[in-house]
Amino acid sequence: MVYEEYVRKAIASGREYHELPERIRTVFSPSDWRNHVKEQCIQRGIDWGSSLARTVCSEGEYYGELLKCYKGWMRMYPYHLASYVNRVMRISPFRYYIDMLVAMLVAEKAYHQLPNFTAADALRLVGVGRNEYIAILNACKNRRVMWRVNRVPIARELLPQMPKEPARLEPWWGVSCVNLGEGEYRELTPEEMAHVKTASLTSGSVQVRDLEEAVLRELLRKGLLYIEVPVLPEDRFSIPPLEGFVSNKDAAPLGLEGGADPLESVLYAVFVANNERLTVSELAGILNVDTRAVQAALGVASRLGFATRVTPSIAPDTLASSPSLSGTRGGLGRTSGGALASSPVQSSFAPLIDLEEQEEEAGTCKGLGAVGRFGSQTL
């Protein structure tokens, strides 16, 4: 429908409901508009603070719905939204993938339904690959009667209870602190307390190289600190032969609207076109993709061990002034000036649109049916 296409582009360009032409408002009620805005922003994985979603729902409601949809679509953990999802909501990547695997086990889904990069990240953090998943599912089914009546507790019991030890921590990676409760703070050792204060009071400039590795790994295991991967437009990366990549039959869950992850498409394109002589911004120009999307993709590839940075080390003061891939929020371990990188996937699928040219086209269509969902449409 032309009207729906117009509204989709209006949302992408940041128009609010009162700015729409009257003939569009007669077809889309304010309630329809709110639903469309929230759905489209979630499908594109946009930060609440830099999207129209902030005009239609609260921050907590938005991110809660986003995580629910992401798990249902089996997308990768939204690392670019960690400033709220991890720091405020306290949903760590490990907990996120455990919830996803529990849902898969309860529904007795096949492992190959897990998208490739999601499977690789879950294997890195949880330690559950194809063979482990099949073994756990068989163990669940062997519980027979108990499995029929009480699936969720059994699935959680058989899955790992703690995240895997990180195989590697690059010295240039950033470290940020979650919002600690009083009880958690009281249980910290003096060394851990010093590391938490360093990570929370340095405005996001602290790097892995600045902390003692053993203490850092323990705080990461407890979920009190989390890793950020800052990628700058002038950085260069090499992509060696892939190790640990999980190749599944289905690239995205079938039959789920909006299931395909826009970032996954950028990752595949980066793997094909990247050259270590190209900077991130130059690579983005070749791919005709927004630089922030390539930054986000290379950040994920670096976490997974699929990409290695070949640029010289960046001084901490340079990192502090550079945009962060995790959002624009200030506070513990954040940079207040990282607006450009707060929603890296957003603009790669949101080209500039001349909405005025679409109004005449929309006005020529009459007798349109009921308003549908934006389902599989992603920008």
Image (spheres, rainbow, N blue to C red):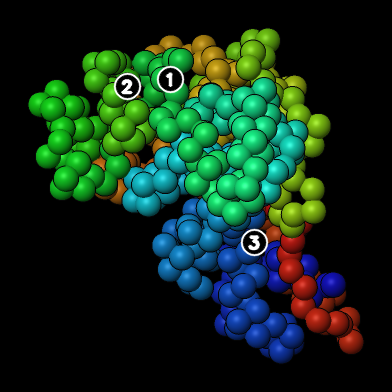
Residue type (three-letter) at the residue carrying disc 1: Pro
Instruction: Pick whichever, 120 or 20, lies toward us.
Output: 120
Q: Is residue 32 left or right of residue 56?
A: right
Residue located beneath label 1 in the image:
166
Rendered-image quadrant of the N terminus: bottom right
Task: Specify the label residue 40 is tagged with.
Answer: 3
Residue 301: image location, x then y, percent = 58, 25
- Say whether marks 2 and 3 touch (CB < 8 Å): no
Residue located beneath label 2 in the image:
217
Residue type (three-letter) at the residue carrying disc 3: Gln
* Label 2 to label 1: alpha-carbon separation: 8 Å
Label 1 or label 3, whichever comes before in sequence order: 3
Which residue is rendered at x = 34% and y = 51% of the image?
88
* Label 2 to label 3: alpha-carbon separation: 37 Å
Residue 261 seen in the current view:
no
Residue 32 seen in the current view:
yes
In the rendered view, would you say 317 is above or below 348? above
Residue 331: image location, x then y, percent = 26, 47
Label 2 or label 1, whichever comes before in sequence order: 1
At label 3, counting other C-alpha atoms closer than 10 Å, the crowd grade (few under 14, some 14-19, many 20 or more) is: many
Query: Would you identify the image quadrant in which residue 101 lies?
Result: top right
- Say whether marks 2 and 1 touch (CB < 8 Å): yes
